[in-house]
Amino acid sequence: MQSAREPGLGRARAASAPRVPATNRTLVWFGGEAQRRRHVSAGAQEAVPGGVARRSAGWQRLEIFGCAALAALAVAALPSLNAVGMRPCLTQPLVLTPGADLDVKMTVSPKAACTISAKANGITVNDVTITAAPLHGTIAQRGRTGVTYRPTGRSGSEDFFAFAIRGTQDRRDQVSLFRVHVTIN
């Protein structure tokens, strides 16, 4: 029996195995020939079984870029629309004052609901009562401090409604009346 350290045995095994040069995978991947092959294959469409062609990666990148550009344009355009006056609802802020009669202006777009509420400082609000219903819209109570108006009229018309808020301050019942003049834009 021969030992593994015999002089001729190791050389025989080494001579029988083909010698493969060591390669650097980074150089192979980024080499000029490999990049050229990838570029050519990316430009061509590959046929998929069933007769449908698969799009190359280059086209997918362009579509993604186009979608991202359109989304950025839409996001940039939305604030400018609001600056021009395209807001669906504008109201004056209300502060609930005991026993006050207040006239309030509201501007609303034809298909939007608009909420108007009073800020109650130091007053316990008991309830909201609608004292005059609108002619060109509907109104609903919003909690105990306001109402929501939804127009049914077309743009350029006007409407009017009124509501009262009954509250308690210093153990006295107080009623505040809000008359709301609506412009439908």
Image (spheres, grey):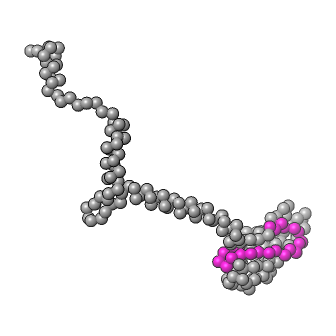
**Compared with residue 59, is residue 137 higher up or lower down, i.e. above or below?**
below
Q: Residue furthest bottom?
A: 135
Q: Is residue 185 magenta?
A: no
Q: Residue at x 30, y 65 (%)?
A: 52
* Quadrant of the image containing the C terminus: bottom right
In the image, 159: left or right of 172? left
Kindly indicate the quadrant of the structure image that contains residue 57: bottom left
**Compared with residue 157, is residue 40 higher up or lower down, i.e. above or below?**
above
Q: Give residue 146's position: percent from left, percent from top.
A: 76, 71
Q: Which residues are magenta?
A: 93-114
In the image, 183: left or right of 101? left
**Compared with residue 161, is residue 87 higher up or lower down, i.e. above or below?**
above
Q: From this viewpoint, is residue 138 visible?
A: no
Q: Give residue 128's position: percent from left, percent from top.
A: 78, 73
Q: Residue at x 13, y 16 (%)?
A: 8
In the image, 21: left or right of 63? left
Q: Residue at x 81, y 68 (%)?
A: 94
Work out whether residue 172 or residue 21 is closer to the camera in this orientation and state it.
21
* Quadrant of the image containing the N terminus: top left
Q: From this viewpoint, is residue 5 visible?
A: yes
Work out whether residue 28 or residue 92 is closer to the camera in this orientation and state it.
28
